[in-house]
Image: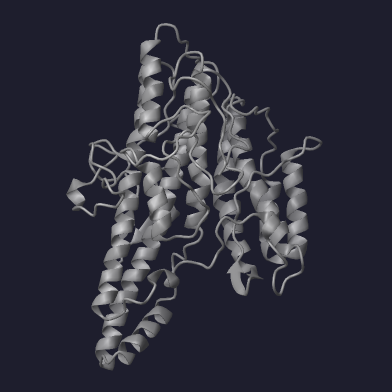
Amino acid sequence: MQKTPFFSGKAEVTPKNLGEAIQQAIEIEIATIPVYLFTYYSVNRVPDQDAISGALAQELTRKGMETPEANKVALRLSAEIMVYANKIGATIMSVVMEEMLHMSLSSNLKQALIGQPHLTGRSPSVYPACLPGHEPEFDINLAPFSLDQLMTFLKIESPDPLPETTPLLKAIPYKTIGQFYDMIEKCLEKYDKKLRYSTDRPQLVPGRRYYANNNIDTVYYDINHKAQYMDADDSGDLVHVVDLKSAKKAISQIVEQGEGNTGAPGLNPNGSVDCKPLNDKDYDDKDKKELSHFEKFALLYCEYNELNEKFAQYGLQDINISNYFVLNVPTNPTTAKYPKADKYPEGTIQAVSNLLNAVYTYVFIMTEGCYQADENTQYEIFMFGIHKTMIFILNSLCGDIQGLTYTENGQTFQATATFENYPFGLMSSPKSQLIELYNEAVALYPTISYLAQRFQDLPDVRLTDSPRGK
């Protein structure tokens, strides 16, 4: 398990260690992003309903149900699976978007009070990993969708402390992410007259379309084919941090989006999920249109069990419904562990994986660059760099790599994104290295040739000095 050193000594945020505390907050947010993204890309949001319905009808008739009734039940169950699979994707992506917003909000806070936030190379380098400073420790894995993975998500977003185990040292310890941000906020309040907020250093601010509440990946369609958007318009936005009031606004938004703002409880004392009525759940917006991250994941957890119960009513309790929409991807893969791909030249998976990791890392390089750029350059970096990279390059490559397969211990897996920190060299620009990696990958995997111009169009952003823990 990776442990990130930040501090030694008292578990307290003071003006002396404030910069390190905010950097720890940034890295807590970053640690969640690859985990959520990995699980998102393990889900087939639009599985083949005809295939699902046909297989279920056959199983129901085998168990003695008349064919017309079996077809009717199979169609209904397959429709519920289709809705649920699509809802999983919309839910997780809505949380990913807000985690990236939280990274920017905490980066704004550091930029205002201390200076340059450090983002590049701060994703966990080893899995299982852990949230920096969280007590108790618990494993977070790059793993496909499952109830176990949902439980990990619930632990990450829990508004209540988890049962105790061994504490993590060399970081400011905390029981919940909200508690950690509360320590930062108390420091800001206590030393407000001594702290100075910079209004000159660039931040990612509202009003420039840097953050959008919803996109095509955060919507799903219910059983009546009605669009359901996961994010509410009033749930939050970027905040320009210039004083204590705006700093507290940024912090409260991060906490409320993750844990909620009405004080609803988290996991049960025994660690189980309370599938309570929807009106007892916690929201992150005043109009109660968007659930907190914790409640979004709790709802997915409970709905999965409800689906299992419906299958059991028809004698289908032995069916693993995840098999209908979860791809057969490995847990905690690394590029170095990918072997020769079946039906593809040796090195193909590694080449595409290296490219994908470089693209993922370049998103953080560009985000760091936004905190050094003037207003015009910042807009170009974000809208033509970060935004288009996430939508048109990273998203595409995450799908393309899954077209490559390999066999390990007699089992065939689909390759998938590993979300590793790519070690860009200093002798040339990261963009030029990206293009070299693309040329190497496309020579082995022509499927990705359509991305050539996308790489050429990326802004050229240099590496910044990002010392660990500063």
Q: Is residue 360 above or below residue 253?
A: below
Report the front residue among 113 and 158. Answer: 158
Q: What residue is at 69 percent from the left and 49 percent from the top?
A: 455
Report the front residue among 413 and 220. Answer: 413
Whether residue 222 is visible to the viewer of this picture, yes or no, is: no
Q: Quadrant of residue 243?
A: top left
Task: Please say which color scheme the image uses.
Answer: one colour
Q: What residue is at 36 percent from the left and 59 percent from the top?
A: 87
Q: Quadrant of residue 53?
A: bottom left
In x, y percent, where is residue 3? 56, 37
- Tell me the quarter of the image containing the N terminus: top right
In x, y percent, where is residue 321? 38, 71
Q: What residue is at 36 percent from the left and 88 percent from the top?
A: 58
Q: Is residue 264 above or below residue 341?
A: above
Report the front residue among 219 and 86. Answer: 86
**283 sits left or right of 199 in the view:** left
In x, y percent, where is residue 277? 18, 53
Q: Is residue 261 above or below residue 418?
A: above
Q: Quadrant of residue 5?
A: top right
In x, y percent, where is residue 68? 26, 91
**462 sits left or right of 364 in the view:** right
**464 sits left or right of 215 in the view:** right
**102 sits left or right of 440 in the view:** left
